[in-house]
Each structure stands twice: as structure tokens, then as C-alpha cells.
Image (tube, helix red, strand yellow):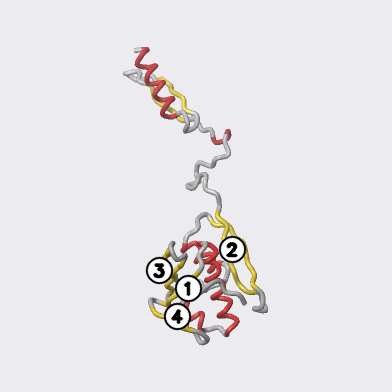
Amino acid sequence: MKYHLLMVMLCSILLFGGCGQKSIETENNSDNTPSVTEQSDKDATDIDEDTTDIGKDPVNLKIYGLDENAENLVTDDIELETLDEQTIWKALQDNGKISAESTLLEFSKDEKTKTLYLDVDHNFGDRLRSFGTSGENSMMISVVNTYLDAYECERLKITEEGDILVSGHAEYTGYLQKITP
């Protein structure tokens, strides 16, 4: 019986040794089998066990735009928990660069050509068409430069619900590179 108890204790230590403090206690039950109870070691460590992304560092994102005179390129650095096309889109919305009603419908990246493809909804196009030249430039600089920088790509093609994105000032038929004012 002692050998069996010793083996159970050894296996428990090996199985649970790296997962916080564990102790084996024998309860007064009919078969005297050991039970494992967990002791909280939250005070002894800086790791927050409630965090789902333990060990992941925040990701920095540079959001581009124009200053209030629409003359100079400005950037805002923010931290995100994850970096993907939807969190970037949401960050652009939260920073007022694109409308909250707009939706990114499709996104893809071609590694070979370092090209991004974005398909946006009509809300995005309608908002773009509502601006004058400066407002349109600011909105496009925000989207194009932010995505190209985040994905370390060289060009981006943007469409509106699968069709050519057309504003009152431009038809975005080709590939866009980082835009400067």
C-alpha cells in the first residue's frame, strides 16, 4: 500500500509540478485513495490566471492621418492585443479615421508580391464620397498607410463591394503605395 501511495504521489508531482502549487492529501474516505487539492499561488506570481493571452505582448500599431490643416502626415501609436485586419479596421474606426458604420468585407495578403487586397462596403465608399479632396486624401492615407505599415507590404488594392472604388475625385483602379500629402 505504501508503494502504491508513493507512486501516486510521484506521478502527481510530475504531472502537476509546473502548474502551480499542488498538494496531495489523504481524505478519510472508505478506500484511503489520495486526492489532489489545488492551493492558490496567485500571490506568489505576477501571472494573472484570468488572462486568456498569458505571455502575449501587446502589438504596436501606427495609425496614419493628416494634421488639422491636411498638410502634414501625422501618426498615432496605439497598442493592440492582437494584430489582424479586423483589429486594425476597428482601431481606424475608434480613432475617427473611418466611419463606425463601415465594414471591411474581405482581406487578403499576397506574400510574394507584398500586396494587400481590401474590399470595403458601400458605407465606406459613401463616406469617402462625402468629403472634399483633403478629407478624401486623409481617409485614404489612413487606410492605405496603416495597413501597408502593419503588414510590411508595398502596395494595396481597395475595392467597394467587389467593384472599383470611385469617389468624386478619383477612381481607385490600380494598386496604391504609401501615400504622402
Given this view, does label 4 or label 1 mark the residue nearer the observer? 4
Residue 116: x %, y % from top left: 45, 67
Disc 4 is placed on an element classified as loop
Residue at position x 43%, y 21% in the image: 25
Q: Which mark is residue 106?
A: 3
- Identify the residue position indicated by label 1 in the image: 101
Given this view, does label 4 or label 2 mark the residue nearer the observer? 4
Q: Are marks 3 and 4 in contact (CB under 8 Å)?
A: no
In primary-sequence order, the first of circles 2 and 3 is 2
Q: Real-space Cα distance between discs 3 and 4? A: 17 Å
Q: Is residue 12 above or below residue 158?
A: above
Residue at position x 39%, y 79% in the image: 163
**Is 172 on the left-hand or right-hand side of 75?**
left
Q: Which mark is residue 173?
A: 4
Q: Real-space Cα distance between discs 2 and 3? A: 21 Å
**Is 65 on the left-hand or right-hand side of 15?**
right
Disc 2 is placed on an element classified as strand
Number of other residues with Cα within 10 Å of mark 4, as a class: few under 14, some 14 to 19, many 20 or more: few
In primary-sequence order, the first of circles 3 and 4 is 3
Residue at position x 45%, y 80% in the image: 173
Q: Amino acid at mark 3?
A: Glu
Residue at position x 47%, y 80% in the image: 172
Q: Which mark is residue 62?
A: 2
